[in-house]
Image (spheres, grey):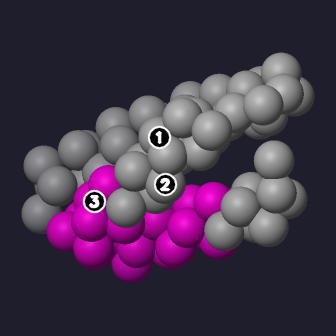
Amino acid sequence: MDKNKFSELKSGVQEIIDFIASKNAREANNKLVEVSEELDEMLDHLEEDEDLIEISKYQVLLNQLQQRIILLDGQI
């Protein structure tokens, strides 16, 4: 799979983290949805096991970030 796609994912995840750090739950959630959709699209076109392993790492990270957003949203 194109390594550029993983760079885009990494950048998107960083944006989510930045939104969480600035306590902007709405934008963090919007970006999370966007990145999750990209990840799903990548899953549909997988060709190698290495890519599946890399994508599964992002899935776990996105799940953890979603939990942080939920907690953040409850604090606001």
State how far apart marks 3 and 2 are (Cα). 14 Å
As drawn, is 61 to the left or to the right of 53?
A: left
State how far apart marks 1 and 3 are (Cα). 16 Å
Q: Position of residue 68 (x, y in %)?
A: 37, 45
Give the residues drawn in magenta, as a range.
9-33
- Tell me if label 1 and label 3 are in contact, CB under 8 Å: no
Q: Position of residue 56 (x, y in %)?
A: 65, 27
3 or 2: tag closer to the N-terminus? 3
Is 43 in front, or is 62?
43
1 or 3: tag closer to the N-terminus? 3
Query: Which quadrant: the C terminus?
Result: bottom left
Choose mark 1 or mark 3, whichever is in front.
1
Quarter assignment of residue 58: top right
- Tell me: residue 71, above or below residue 31: above
Magenta stretch, main secondary structure, is helix
Residue type pointed to by label 3 = Asn
Q: Which residue was labeled with disc 1?
A: 40
Is 62 in front, or is 19?
62
- Tell me if label 3 and label 2 are in contact, CB under 8 Å: no
- Tell me if label 2 and label 1 are in contact, CB under 8 Å: yes
Q: Which residue was labeled with disc 2?
A: 38
